[in-house]
Image: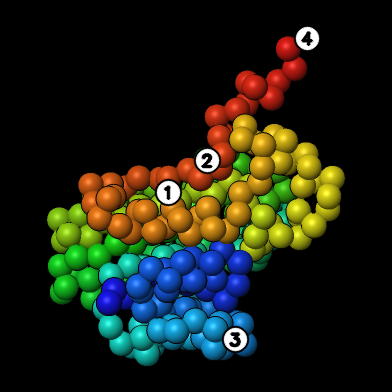
Amino acid sequence: MKHAIVTGAGKGIGKEISEHLNKNGYRVGMIDIDDEALENNSKIYKNTVAIKGDVTDEESIKKAFEKFGETPDLLVNNAGIVIFGTLDEQGVRNFKKSINISLVGSYITSLTAIKRMIKKGSGSIINMSSINGIHPGPGTGGYPAAKAGIISLTQQMAIEWGHYGIRVNSISPGFIDAGMSKPIYADPKVRELRGKSVPIKRLGEAKDIANAVLFLASEQASYINGHNLVVDGGVINSVIAQLPRE
């Protein structure tokens, strides 16, 4: 049996990733600050361990790994936050919060995992970025900066840890009808407009991201390292297609 740890696993995309890994033979450590959501999940899925943990707190994450017990074959750094508002509106406190949870949190959890993976001589780390980390969107505060940082951090981890037999990649989801974006797509007009703007004419689903995780963690991706996999239905490549021609 393989072992995986997923952060931000209480709901949304993190929960979906945990479920997919579980169904594909992984024992999953589901880390989140929402212990109630984790407890409910652990009752549904077999071979899962619900672990309350704060990715911005080194000691909290260290204890979470100790509770999980096994050295993970896979770590998915999914925990993140978006605080909507312009940069001047949200201020330094909220900007730091976005950076700390998404970027610093990914570093802390990876650092905790790598110490164990090095002893094992193998492992895979997948960091969750966003298309906002490639092309920032207005009104998303520190989120784009955090996600851009994750892409760069992933590349650095890959070149520094590859010789240990550990691969590090990132995923950049596009318009996904799940998690933090769920409230946005509750508006039918927004759903329709966003869906039409995607070249394949639909919003993404949490399972699209979970399937990407399974691929990057698999032997089929054994020579992929330091890559940012964009899962967006073609959105970031469709700028010219969206411009009026008359």
Q: Amino acid at mark 3?
A: Asn
Q: Do callouts 2 and 4 mark residues in contact (Cβ within 8 Å)?
A: no
Nearer the camera: disc 2 or disc 3: 3
Q: Quadrant of residue 157?
A: bottom left
Q: Tell me which label, 3 or 4, sits earlier in the chain.
A: 3
Measured in 3D between alpha carbons, the distance from the residue under mark 2 to the one under mark 4, in whole angstroms, is: 29 Å
- The residue positioned 30% from the left and 57% from the top of the image is 218
Q: Amino acid at mark 1?
A: Ile
The circle drawn on residue 151 is: 1
Nearer the camera: disc 4 or disc 1: 4
Q: Secondary structure at mark 3?
A: helix
Q: Secondary structure at mark 1?
A: helix
Q: Secondary structure at mark 4?
A: loop
Q: Tell me which label, 3 or 1, sits earlier in the chain.
A: 3
The circle drawn on residue 246 is: 4
- The residue positioned 36% from the left and 86% from the top of the image is 68
Q: Tell me which label, 2 or 3, sits earlier in the chain.
A: 3
